[in-house]
Amino acid sequence: MLKITNLHANVEDTPILKGINLEINPGEVHAIMGPNGSGKSTLSNVLMGNPVYEVTEGTIIFNGKDITEEPVDNRAKEGMFLAFQYPESIPGVTIVNMLKTALTNIENTDYSTLELRLKVADAMKDLGLSPDFVDRYLNEGFSGGEKKRNEILQMKMLKPKIAILDEIDSGLDVDALKVVGENVTAMKNDNLGLLLITHYQRLLEYIKADFIHVMMKGKIVKSGNMDLMERIDTEGYDWIK
Ligand code: ADP
Ligand code: MG
């Protein structure tokens, strides 16, 4: 479903990604771990099509289509979703309006605000968010936990085919991590591909990954299963060269 081949990308003329190869099939959960600064967030941004990052070599195939040069909104329409490591605040735009715009674009259905409120109610309950949460401006003054729950709320509503969750566990206390983990696990199905980007192994206690990849200096240097994660947990990254 998602095939990344020899992907190289620059930020402001500095090479960050140096030949990433990764294939994610429907129903698979892949985790990318790695030290800070290894290029994990760069990869998620490049996959989603953030124009700050320049692809210099390689291809991204999604649903059989080469999307390497496609703009962000086309990728979203195709069913790609990114939960940001650092979600940005957008003053003046409420969550309910943002969801309305996104769903109108992706599903080609024009929901009324009332319909949308009803549609989002169950998802909010699952995430332990109160109904008036959707009237707040996107990420304005949100706590770490609220930001991450909001990212998962978007994912629940947009029902992507591939979801990239960039450090969805960062800044979460144990309770919030449990809520996020359970909600993501509940969304797992045979059609969804998941790419979990995480610095710590604790997220993977809640969301089991089929494949673990270690990224260092812009490359995937090692791939394995949950055993690899456990070794990283006890020995860190130094033994991987
Ligand atoms: P990770 O998510 O693994 O911690 P990042 O992808 O955030 O790593 O960063 C990898 C490198 O790319 C870092 O040296 C970082 O400073 C640089 N980088 C990433 N995004 C930008 C950006 N928008 N502008 C400038 N430098 C960036
Ligand atoms: Mg990062």
Image (cartoon, rainbow, N blue to C red):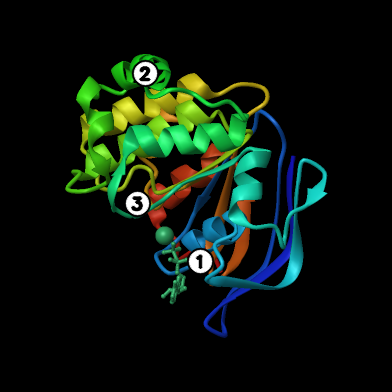
Query: Where residue 104 sits: x, y (%)?
Result: 54, 33
Q: Quadrant of ligand 2?
A: bottom left
Q: Residue furthest right?
A: 64
Q: Nearer the viewer, mark 3 or mark 2?
A: 2
Q: Describe residue 66's horizontal placement relative to residue 118 as left or right.
A: right
Q: CA distance from mark 2 to mark 1?
A: 41 Å
Q: Which amino acid does the dot numbered 2 rest on?
A: Leu
Helix, strand or loop at label 3? It is loop
Check contact, mark 2 vs mark 1: CB within 8 A: no
Mark number displayed over residue 39: 1
Q: CA distance from mark 1 to mark 3?
A: 18 Å
Mark 2 surroundings: few (<14), some (14-19) or many (≥20) residues within 10 A: few
Read off the residue under disc 3: 87
Q: Which amino acid does the dot numbered 1 rest on?
A: Gly
Looking at the image, which is closer to me, 139 or 84?
A: 139
Cβ of mark 2 under 8 A from ligand 2: no
- Taking the spot 56% from the left edge, 67% from the top edge, the residue there is 51
Q: Earlier in the sequence, mark 3 or mark 2?
A: 3
Using the rendered image of the protein, determine whether residue 23 is visible from the camera's viewpoint: yes
- Taking the spot 59% from the left edge, 61% from the top edge, the residue there is 46
Residue 150, compared with residue 62, is above or below; it is above
- Taking the spot 37% from the left edge, 14% from the top edge, the residue there is 118
Read off the residue under disc 2: 114
Q: CA distance from mark 3 to mark 2?
A: 26 Å
Q: Which amino acid does the dot numbered 3 rest on?
A: Pro
Q: Describe residue 13's horizontal placement relative to residue 83 as left or right.
A: right
- Occupied quadrant, residue 69: bottom right
Q: Nearer the viewer, mark 2 or mark 1?
A: 2
Cβ of mark 1 under 8 A from ligand 1: yes
Using the rendered image of the protein, determine whether residue 29 is visible from the camera's viewpoint: no
